[in-house]
Image: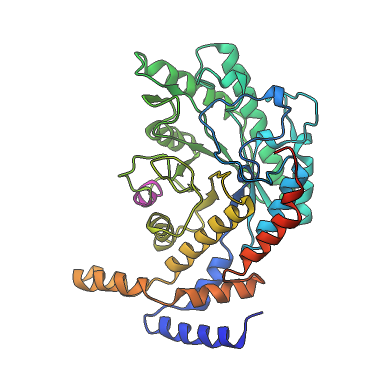
Amino acid sequence: MASASHDRSYDACRDHYARYGVDTEKALERLARCSLSLHVWQGDDVTGFEPAKARRADGGILATGSHPGRARNAEELREDLEKALGLIPGRHRVNLHAMYGAFGDVRVDRDAIDVSHFKGWIDWARERGLKLDFNATCFNHPLAASGFTLSHRDKEVRRFWIEHVKRSRRIAATMGRELQSPAVHNLWIPDGSKDAPFDRWGPRVRLRESLDEIFAAEYSPTHLKDALESKLFGIGSESYVVGSHEFYLGYAQAKGKMVCLDLGHFHPTESVADKISAILQSHPELLLHLSRPMRWDSDHVVVLNEDLTAVCREAVSGRALDRVHFALDYFDASLNRIGAWVIGARAVLKALLISLLEPEAALREVEERGDLFGRLALFEEAKAMPWASVWEAFCARSGVVSGADWMDDVRAYEAGILSRRQGM
C-alpha cells in the first residue's frame, strides 16, 4: 500500500508533469501493459537440465563466477523465478531454452525433444497466469564443437540441428496455444570462423537452405512468432559470423520473420536504439535482447543507463511498444541470481517509464519549428523530472516495494533457501 507521504509526493509529481503536457496516469496505465520476458538461464548459469554426458561447453556461452545457490533442477529454478517475479512490478513472461526440459537421467538428444518434456513448465505457467517464450539450444553440445550447426558442411550434422529447431518451434507453438499468447521462438546459432575463411558464401547458402526447411512448417501467429538473432562476432567466430545482421535482416524481411537485436551484439560505436525506427519501417515487429555489454558482449546485468533508456525511448516515441518484444538476456554467476533478475527487470521498467513521461508534445513542437536550443534544453530538463515518485506509485499499485527494501527479501531468501543448496 502507498503511504500518505507517497500519495502527496505523487500528487505533486503529477502536477509537475502536467505543466509539460504529460499525463502520469496514462503513463502508468501503459507501463502496466508492458511485459518483459525473463530468461531462465540467469538462474542456473546457462547449464540446463540435460544429463551431463549430453552436454559440452561449446559455442561461446559462459557464465563467470561461483556465487552459491545456483538452481539445480526445474523445481528450484521455478521457485527462484517466483521469488524474482514477486519483486518486479507488472505482469511478465518467462523465457526458456530447449535444454531446460524435464529429461531426468534419460538422455534425450536435442533432435528428439517434444512438448512432453516441457509440460511441467506449461502447467506451472498456466497456474500462475504467466506466458512462455522459447529458444532452440544450438550450443553446449558435441555436434556444436566445430563451431558450425545449421551451416555445417556435413549434411548429417545439419540434419540434426534442423530437426532440433523444427521441434523447438513445435514446442513453442504448443506453449502459445496452451497459454493463449503467442510464444516468441528465437534462434541464435554460434556458426562462424575464428580465423579468416576463404569461402564466406558456402556456409550462408547452407544456412539459408536450413532455414527454408525449418520454416516450411507454418503455425498460427496467435501461437508462434519467429525471431532470428545476429551477432557481430563471438568466441571462436572472431573473423566470420555466418548469421550476420545483414543476413538475418534480409532473410527475415523476405520470409516475414522478426529480427532480434541484442544490445551486446554490435560494434560498440553502433547505436541499437537507432536501428529500431529503421527496421520497423519495413518489419511489423522486433525482438530486443537486453543486456549490458562491457568490453563488448559480456552479458552483464542490465542497469539503468543511457543505452537502455535510448532503446526504450525509441520504442515509446515511435508508438511501437505493441510491436517491440522486450526480453532480458544476461548471465552473471558472481552475484545473487534472483537479485540479478530483479535489478535488470526493474531497470528496464524504469527506462520505459522515463520514456513514457518525456514531454513528447513539447519536444516535437520545438523540433518541428527548428528550435534547437529549446529541444536541447527540454532534453536536459526532462532528466531532472521527478519520475521516481511515479515509479513508487507504479510499484505500490503492483503490490511491490519501490525502494531498496526488496534487497532484504532477496537476502532472506538466500539465507533461508539458497544457502541450503549443495553440489554447486
Q: Nearer the viewer, residue 270 or 129?
A: 270
Highlighted magenta segment, given as a residue range: 273-280
The percent position of residue 134, horizontal first and vertical second, equals 63, 40
The percent position of residue 3, horizontal first and vertical second, equals 62, 84
The percent position of residue 256, horizontal first and vertical second, equals 49, 38
Q: Is residue 245 magenta?
A: no
Residue displayed at 53% across by 22% down: 150
The type of colouring in the image is: rainbow
The percent position of residue 264, horizontal first and vertical second, equals 43, 43
Quadrant of the snapshot with the N terminus: bottom right
Quadrant of the snapshot with the C terminus: top right
Judge from the rendering whether residue 96 lies leftward or rightward of residue 211; answer left or right. right
Judge from the rendering whether residue 372 lies leftward or rightward of residue 412; answer left or right. left
Residue displayed at 61% across by 31% down: 137
Whether residue 371 appears in this view of the structure is: no
Residue displayed at 51% across by 76% down: 390
Judge from the rendering whether residue 3 lies leftward or rightward of residue 347; answer left or right. right
Seen in the picture, residue 63 relative to 222 is either above or below; the reply is above
Q: Quadrant of residue 251?
A: top left
Judge from the rendering whether residue 113 lies leftward or rightward of residue 202; answer left or right. right
- Magenta: main secondary structure equals helix
Q: Nearer the viewer, residue 53 or 191?
A: 53
Report the number of discs: 0
Whether residue 231 appears in this view of the structure is: yes
Seen in the picture, residue 11 relative to 348 is either above or below; the reply is below
